[in-house]
C-alpha cells in the first residue's frame, strides 16, 4: 500500500533546494583545488556549461542565460578565449554577430569537472537509503528540465511536456 506523502508548498521546496545548493557550493569549491580544474573560475565554468548547451550562441544569448550584462560577458569570453577554452567566429546568419563555441580544451575541462563532481555526488549518494534513490532521481530530472527551460537553454524545449506533467 502506498503511503500518502505530506503536502509541501513551493516555498518549502525552494528553501530545501537553497539549502542543498549551499552544500553543493561547498562541495564544488573543494573542486577548485582539483588539478584538472585549477585556474578555471566558477563563473567561467557556468559560461562554458551554457555555451556547450547552446553551441553557436551569441553574446546576447549568453548574457541572458547567465543573467549578466553584455560587457561583463564579453570580458569573460575574452578570458575564456585567451585560456584556449572558447572560440569565437562570425555568425552564420549575420556577419555582425559572433558565435561562441567550446574548444577541444573547453570540452575537456567540462568533462573533467563533471567526472570530479560525479565522484563527489556518488560518495554522498552512498549515504542515502536505496528506497529513496528512485524518487530523488525523478525529482532531480524534473527540476533540471524546469531550470533549463527557465534559463532558456534549448534542450528544455524538447522536455517541456514532461515538466508540465510533473508540475
Image (cartoon, rainbow, N blue to C red):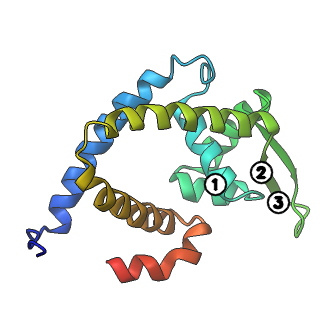
User: Which quadrant of the view contains residue 154?
Assistant: bottom right
The answer to whether marks 1 and 3 mark residues whose Cβ atoms lie closer than 8 Å is no
Q: Is residue 86 left or right of residue 159?
A: right
| Residue in front for this viewpoint, 83 or 156 | 156
Secondary-structure class at tag 1: helix
- Dot 1 corresponds to which residue? 62
**Secondary structure under the numbered disc 2 in the rendered image:** strand
Q: Residue placed at 24% from the left, 54% from the top?
A: 132
Residue 97 - label: 3
Q: Is residue 125 left or right of residue 162?
A: left
For label 3, the crowd category at 10 Å Cα-Cα, with few meaning under 14, some 14 to 19 and many 20 or more, is some
Asked if the residues shown at circle 2 and circle 3 are in contact, with their CB atoms under 8 angstroms apart, the answer is: no
Residue drawn at x 68%, y 59% is 54
Quadrant of the snapshot with the C terminus: bottom left
User: Which of the two labelled residues, at mark 1 and mark 3, occupies the earlier sequence position?
Assistant: 1
Question: What x and y, as percent, mark residue 60?
Answer: 66, 58
Residue 102 relative to residue 65: left or right = right
Q: Are marks 2 and 1 in contact (CB under 8 Å)?
A: yes
According to the image, label 2 marks what residue?
Answer: 100
Gap in angstroms between the C-alphas marked 1 and 3: 13 Å
Amino acid at each position: 500500500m502506498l503511503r500518502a506523502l505530506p503536502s509541501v508548498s513551493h516555498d518549502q521546496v525552494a528553501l530545501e533546494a537553497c539549502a542543498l545548493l549551499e552544500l553543493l557550493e561547498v562541495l564544488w569549491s573543494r573542486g577548485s583545488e582539483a588539478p584538472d580544474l585549477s585556474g578555471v573560475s566558477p563563473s567561467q565554468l557556468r559560461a562554458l556549461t551554457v555555451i556547450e548547451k547552446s553551441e553557436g550562441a551569441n553574446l546576447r544569448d549568453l548574457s541572458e542565460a547567465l543573467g549578466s550584462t553584455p560587457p561583463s560577458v564579453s570580458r569573460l569570453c575574452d578570458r575564456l578565449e585567451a585560456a584556449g577554452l572558447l572560440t569565437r567566429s562570425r555568425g552564420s546568419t549575420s556577419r555582425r554577430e559572433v558565435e561562441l563555441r567550446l574548444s577541444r580544451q573547453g570540452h575537456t575541462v567540462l568533462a573533467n569537472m563533471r567526472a570530479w563532481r560525479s565522484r563527489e555526488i556518488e560518495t554522498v549518494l552512498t549515504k542515502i537509503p536505496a528506497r529513496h534513490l528512485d524518487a530523488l532521481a525523478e525529482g532531480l530530472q524534473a527540476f533540471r528540465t524546469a531550470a533549463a527551460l527557465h534559463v532558456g537553454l534549448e534542450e528544455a524545449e524538447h522536455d517541456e511536456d514532461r515538466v508540465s506533467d510533473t508540475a
